Image (tube, rainbow, N blue to C red):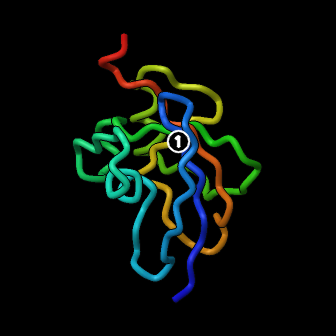
Amino acid sequence: MPEVTIHIIDRENIPHDILVPTDMGLNLMEISKAEGLPVEGTCGGMALCATCQVYIESNHKLHEPSADEIAMLDQAFFVEQNSRLGCQIKINEDIDGLIVRLAPAVMDI
C-alpha cells in the first residue's frame, strides 16, 4: 500500500509525523482528526466552516483552491497567504513530506 508522511505542527508547536495511505481518498482534516489533533472539521469537509484551516509551511505545489475554499477563507479568522482548508487537501503521492501548521482556533480569540 503506498504511503506518504505528513508533518503537522499543532497549536502547542509540537510536530507530529504521520504516515498516511494514499489509496483511501482521505484528506488532511480527516487525518488530523484521526490522530487526535484539535481540528474540528465542523462541516464534515465541505469547505463551509474553516475549522480545519492550516498554514502550508513547505514548498509543495498543491492544487489551486476552489472558489468555495477561497470564499470560506475570505470569511475566516487568522488567514495568512499560506492558509488552506485541510479538508480540501487530498492525500496523494505528490504531498509526501508536506509540512503544515494548525491555525489558531477561533476560541483562542
Residue 75 locus on image (x, y percent): 39, 24
* Quarter of the figure that contains the C terminus: top left
What residue is shown at x 33% (from left), y 49% (from top)?
36
Residue 54 locus on image (x, y percent): 51, 39
Residue 26 found in image quarter: bottom left
What residue is shown at x 30% (from left), y 36% (from top)?
49
Residue 63 locus on image (x, y percent): 61, 58
Q: Amino acid at mark 1?
A: Arg
What residue is shown at x 56% (from left), y 31% (from top)?
13
Residue 57 locus on image (x, y percent): 68, 41
Q: Is residue 44 above or below residue 23?
A: above
Q: Is residue 2 above or below residue 79?
A: below
Q: Is residue 8 above or below residue 95?
A: above
Badge count: 1
Residue 85 found in image quarter: top left
Of 5 and 76, the residue lying toward us: 5
**10 Å neighbourhood of mark 1: few (<14), some, or many (≥20)?**
many
Of 62 and 18, the residue lying toward us: 18
In this view, the residue farthest toward the top is 109
Q: What residue is disc 1 on?
A: 84
Q: Horizontal placement of 96 versus 49: left or right?
A: right
Q: Is residue 26 above or below residue 101?
A: below
What residue is shown at x 56% (from left), y 35% (from top)?
83
Q: Horizontal placement of 31 versus 107: left or right?
A: right
